[in-house]
Amino acid sequence: MTTEDWLARHTFHHGDFWDLLAMIREKERQNLTLSLCIPTLNEEATIGKEIVIFKSELMDRYPLLDEIAVIDSGSEDRTCEVARSFGADVYRSADILPAHGTRRGKGENLWKAIHQLKGDVIVYVDADIKNIHPRFVWGLAGPVIYRPDIHYVKAFYDRPLAFSQGVRPSGGGRVTEILVRPLFSLFYPDLAAMIQPLSGEYAVRRHVLERLRFPIGYGVETSHLIDVHRQWGMAALAQTDLDQRVHRNQATRDLGRMAFGILQTFFSRARDHGLLDVHAPLHTVLRQFQVQDRDFEQVLHEIVEEERPPMIEIPEYRAARGLAGGDG
Amino acid sequence: MTDLACDPGADLPQLRERLRPLREIFLANLILTSEIPAPTFGEEARARFVLQRFSEAGLPGGSLDEAGNAAVELPGANPARRILVVAHTDTLHTAAEDHAVAVQPDRLVGPGIGDNAAGVAAMMTLPRLLATLGIRLDATLVLLGAGRSLGPGNLGGLKFFLDHAKHPFAAGLCLEGLELGRLNFASLGLLRGEIVCRVPRDYDWARFGPVNAIVILADALARIQGIPLPARPRTDMVFGQVSGGTGYGRAARTARLRLDVRSESAATLAEVEGRIGAIAEELAHGTRTEIAFVPVARRQPGALPFDHPFVREARAILAGLGLEPHIEPSMSELSAFLERDIPALTIGLTRGENVGEADETVFIEPLFDGLAQLLSLLQALDRSGRPADDD
């Protein structure tokens, strides 16, 4: 399949799935269940609206979702209280699979959600979206529900600014455009067609999720795309335009840390796939600098992209789902 | 019909509790409505959302009219008796403002969330509320999201709708998000206009000397402020906006004052308008400039009697909720009804703060009282029109 073919057949707009009643009928026909997972860490300002909107629109009004769960990394604000007050199931990441310990990072929450949540499909949506709307879920669920060949659907956000020409550039954020897309173009050119590879919103079938390794930090989105592409091919991937996403803008320094984590994940996979020779072990300290007058201060960040194994290898998970080799 | 609908003395606290499971449905309607900008004359997107909600509630016959209104009928057993429930859709906020709503456990915050997204959300959620609670009305409800209500809109949407309705209305109910406990059944008369002062292009500076539109306007303002206003009938005047000139160092050639005069008496309004006109005329003559009073909106005062059955019912319902009615004349949609001899009331749905600001706030808990009040009052209005033996 050429990139053009893939873009034509695997790129959607949320408006393609406006008929929610039809989508629910199709979901019920297949006997599919859908879980929504919102990973949180100190998101009290935005979590309440997300829960209200999704519960009202996609559970009470249109029963598309079977479950809404917040997986929290240990918020110190009122995130859990707010989410619970509006009817979400709230779990502390540390309480899930406690024998496997606790790591701090968004990827950890996403991984533990596979064990905790019940759905055949899990839709992940970040908690910091200011302009939340039910399309964030239905736009991602639609391709999975209607297309059995699609297993992993990623969000992208087109920003319809005014342009003098008829063509407008579509792209991701700064880390995408100056790091991830060039890397993909060099090593995994098919994946360069993902317009926003780092977006935090995606819908994935369980049988794919449980077979993915999960970096616990910044690398989780990048690794997913590489691994799904490697195991199931581009045909399993799709992307949906959700229009606009309003969220916190991150400082360039924070993006530096993100890029550092992504690079660790990327190099380890490129090395495993025989695409890159890295002979020495990689350093795990990011060095940033700040200056005051003529004093330069080095700021060190230890960033280790530890990875969780595929959930299907975890005995408790196998036992809970009645798979051979489980604990029980 | 349920016990609730049959029993005029239905237990209001019980009704309030039965509304709680619908909280997320209502709040989502409120958030999604409030996040669609709807400045006066720019309400179409919000009106379309209202229609979409009606359609989703199984009422596909809604329509959008040329005055920016979204309307639908919720048929009752009696198609000839019609009650109009109206909430204005427009807000004081421009489309450029950030309309994102923040949700906290006890409150929602965002521009226009109380005035009047909460009123619109209540109106658009009514079909669902009635159906879920098993309340069937005898009268046909007409639900109207009215456009062009505020400021220069001058209630244009509602007036247009009333003037072009094919069938008469037996009653009107105006929904305002804020403030729970308000009960308006009297409408103040309004004279809204502007004093515009212009130095003509052919003003003879050499012959008549230097002149400044702002100075003349200040004189006009002082004289208008000197017009005696009676305490009874209650009358007041609000200077709302002054503008003019082009900046430092140049005498202003234009100046403008926007003001409202409000009164319980149409005769008093006419008298004040005459005096303002005379002041403008005298100043124009004395200064050789163009100065005039230009009315932009008028509303006739009107009121239901204090012992009108609607008012009695509304007060009893508020008392049943343990609320003290806050009774005062209103400047809202009420006047359009009363001018057309349609008995009507305005009620508020919740409590809030920072009205008109970017952090306008509504509180969630009082909404249950507000919605219980709304349902109970609708049942009361419905009963009031039935034959006695039907009660």
Image: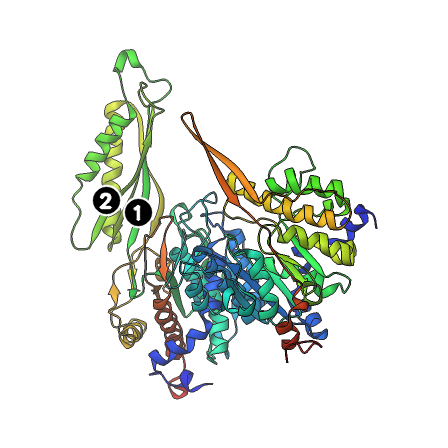
Give me the chain letter of mark 2.
Answer: B
User: What is the distance, in whole Å, between disc 1 and disc 2 at their CAs?
Assistant: 9 Å
Residue A18 seen in this snapshot: no
Return the residue found at the far front: A280
Q: Residue A135 at x, y = what percent?
A: 60, 58
Q: Where, quadrant-wise, is the C terminus of chain B in this rendering?
A: bottom left
From the image, tell me which residue sits under label 1: B191
- The part of the image, by quadrant, that contains residue B350 is bottom left
The disc at residue A155 is: none
| Circle 1 Cα neighbour tier, 10 Å, few/some/many (<14 / 14–19 / ≥20) | many
The disc at residue B272 is: 2
Give the residue drawn at x 51%, y 48%: A247
Image mark count? 2
In the image, residue A15 above or below residue B83: above
Residue B102 seen in this snapshot: yes
Choose between B173 and B351: the one closer to the eye: B351
Choose between A67 and B226: the one closer to the eye: A67
Give the residue drawn at x 55%, y 68%: A68
